[in-house]
Image (cartoon, rainbow, N blue to C red):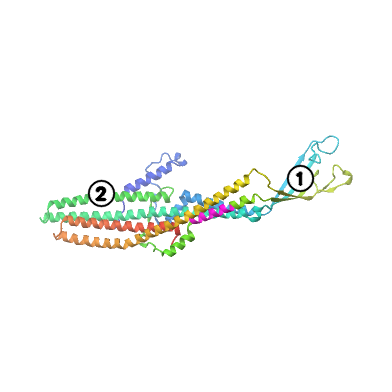
């Protein structure tokens, strides 16, 4: 039966850790009189029971790398919206007043660019870019690539975090199991000591066997203390990942015996080819580099922009007014339009465009090499992790059989020692074998779960 850890050390460690976090916050100046060892509010509440899925959800809310990758993905999505909007005509309003000094003789300005002392401009401007980049929608495709790349990096961050959380989650579970095993071993050592003392009183065993039993009890007591320390440290490691206030008031669900089955090799290969984020990131990087080459080549082509203006540019802010140079014609209409079409033909730039094209081609070649390396690395890691999971799964049955055999050996040697047919050495060896078998089985279960988790970083969840 699993006993609770000594409450004093755990409570004090929790209180100290949360008090230190609180002292680092701006509000610590207001609570300077609070005790450093005050029990946190979270420790006074009922403990939270967490599954691995719950732990992953909490960790994603606190991990800086995942939060940064999620922010980059959202920003890349907004870049895509802006790139699509840039393809359509833009409408803007413009209102100006140009006040100039007159020449004192005519109703004209001293500045030849203004046809009067007072000039009013109220325009509605429609702008349209008809460059090759806009017509081929390269900017939109490039933004799609950037968004896909950002989402792939987000998946990489999430899967890496999932592997880290699983490692710490099952480290706590196996620490709890080894703590329970150490408790059982201590109980067995105490029971062996009682038997030795009874045999000594009945003159059926020498005092040396009692001494050996006492040494065994001391050893198991030390082992229990070490297991307690390991369990507390594992809880702290997991709490750092899950809670911002370093709350240790939680328990985890032991699901080691409910590990998922290992899929067939063909299915794993298909899942990796379809859902590996590192491979997707390499593919999108190459695609983006190819689009950059296309953009660099389009710089050699002419560009056309069209601006259509409708509004007023007159000496009076009115729909009709007299022209200063010909007032005898009476009021004339001011409202109208004009269109400006600009054709820019690149001729000579000292080789800048050709240099940029060369740079983009070099980056495309580098992206192609990176994609090839990523593919080979994926195949190697996929095979290695799959073999690791397969071997770990095969060994679990052997380890479970070893636990059963060690338990039966311990039971038989205990009966033989009570009957005086075995020595304390035989009993100690049986107890040691049982403890080692139990711990090896727990380590083997964790090894399989972690191998599955590492494999899922390449394939996605099974």
Report the residue at 55% width, 55% height from top. 287
Picture quadrant of residue 183:
bottom left
Q: Residue furthest left?
A: 203
* Residue 285 appears in the rendering: yes
Report the residue at 78% width, 47% height from top. 312
Residue closer to the observer: 386 or 21: 386
From the viewer's perspective, tell me whether residue 203 is left or right of residue 435: left
The residue labelled by disc 1 is 121
* Residue 46 appears in the rendering: no
Q: Residue 16 location, x and y as percent?
A: 37, 44
Q: Residue furthest top?
A: 104
The residue labelled by disc 2 is 222
Q: Residue 117 location, x and y as percent?
A: 80, 39
**Residue 290: within the magenta?**
yes
Numbered label attached to residue 84: none
**Residue 2: within the magenta?**
no
Q: What span is in magenta?
A: 278-291
Quarter placement of the C terminus: bottom left
Report the residue at 43% width, 62% height from top. 268
Residue closer to the observer: 426 or 44: 426
Check disc 2 and report its element: helix, strand or loop.
helix
Q: Residue 291 location, x and y as percent?
A: 59, 53
Q: Give whichever of discs 1 and 2 has the lower sequence position.
A: 1
From the viewer's perspective, tell me whether residue 386 is left or right of residue 354: left
Overall secondary structure of the magenta section: helix
Check disc 1 and report its element: helix, strand or loop.
strand
Q: CA distance from mark 1 to mark 2?
A: 90 Å
Instruction: Determine crowd level at label 2: few under 14, some 14-19, many 20+ residues with C-alpha closer than 10 A.
Output: some
Q: Residue 416 location, x and y as percent?
A: 16, 61
């Amino acid at each position: 039966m699993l006993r609770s850890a000594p409450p004093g050390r755990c409570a004090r460690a929790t209180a100290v850790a949360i008090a230190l976090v609180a002292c680092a916050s701006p509000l610590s100046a207001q609570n300077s009189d609070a005790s450093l060892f005050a029990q946190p509010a979270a420790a006074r509440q009922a403990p939270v029971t967490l599954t691995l899925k719950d732990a992953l959800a909490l960790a994603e809310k606190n991990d800086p790398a995942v939060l940064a990758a999620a922010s980059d993905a959202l920003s890349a999505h907004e870049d895509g919206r802006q790139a699509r909007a840039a393809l359509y005509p833009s409408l803007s309003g413009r209102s100006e007043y140009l006040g100039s000094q007159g020449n004192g003789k005519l109703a004209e300005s001293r500045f030849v660019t203004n046809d009067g002392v007072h000039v009013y401009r109220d325009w509605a401007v429609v702008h349209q870019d008809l460059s090759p980049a806009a017509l081929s929608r390269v900017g939109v495709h490039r933004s799609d690539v950037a968004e896909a790349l950002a989402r792939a990096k987000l998946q990489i961050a999430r899967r890496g975090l999932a592997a880290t959380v699983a490692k710490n989650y099952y480290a706590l579970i196996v620490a709890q199991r080894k703590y329970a095993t150490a408790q059982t071993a201590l109980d067995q050592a105490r029971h062996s000591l009682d038997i030795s003392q009874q045999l000594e009183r009945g003159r059926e065993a020498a005092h040396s066997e009692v001494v050996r039993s006492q040494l065994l009890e001391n050893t198991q007591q030390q082992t229990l203390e070490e297991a307690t320390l390991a369990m507390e440290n594992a809880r702290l490691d997991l709490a750092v990942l899950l809670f911002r206030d370093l709350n240790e008031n939680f328990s985890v669900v032991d699901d080691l015996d409910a590990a998922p089955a290992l899929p067939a090799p063909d299915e794993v290969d298909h899942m990796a080819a379809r859902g590996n984020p590192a491979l997707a990131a390499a593919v999108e990087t190459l695609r983006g580099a190819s689009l950059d080459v296309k953009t660099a080549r389009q710089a050699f082509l002419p560009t056309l922009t069209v601006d259509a203006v409708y509004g007023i540019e007159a000496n009076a802010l009115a729909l009709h007014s007299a022209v200063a140079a010909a007032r005898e014609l009476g009021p004339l209409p001011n409202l109208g339009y004009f269109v400006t079409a600009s054709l820019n033909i690149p001729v000579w730039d000292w080789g800048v465009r050709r240099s940029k094209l060369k740079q983009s081609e070099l980056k495309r070649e580098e992206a192609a090499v990176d994609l090839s390396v990523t593919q080979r690395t994926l195949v190697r890691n996929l095979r290695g992790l799959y073999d690791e999971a397969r071997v770990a799964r095969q060994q679990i049955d052997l380890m479970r059989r070893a636990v059963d055999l060690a338990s039966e050996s311990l039971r038989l040697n205990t009966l033989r020692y009570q009957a005086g047919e075995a020595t304390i050495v035989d009993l100690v060896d049986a107890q040691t074998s049982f403890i080692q078998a139990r711990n090896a089985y727990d380590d083997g279960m964790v090894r399989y779960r972690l191998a599955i988790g590492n494999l899922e970083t390449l394939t996605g969840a099974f």
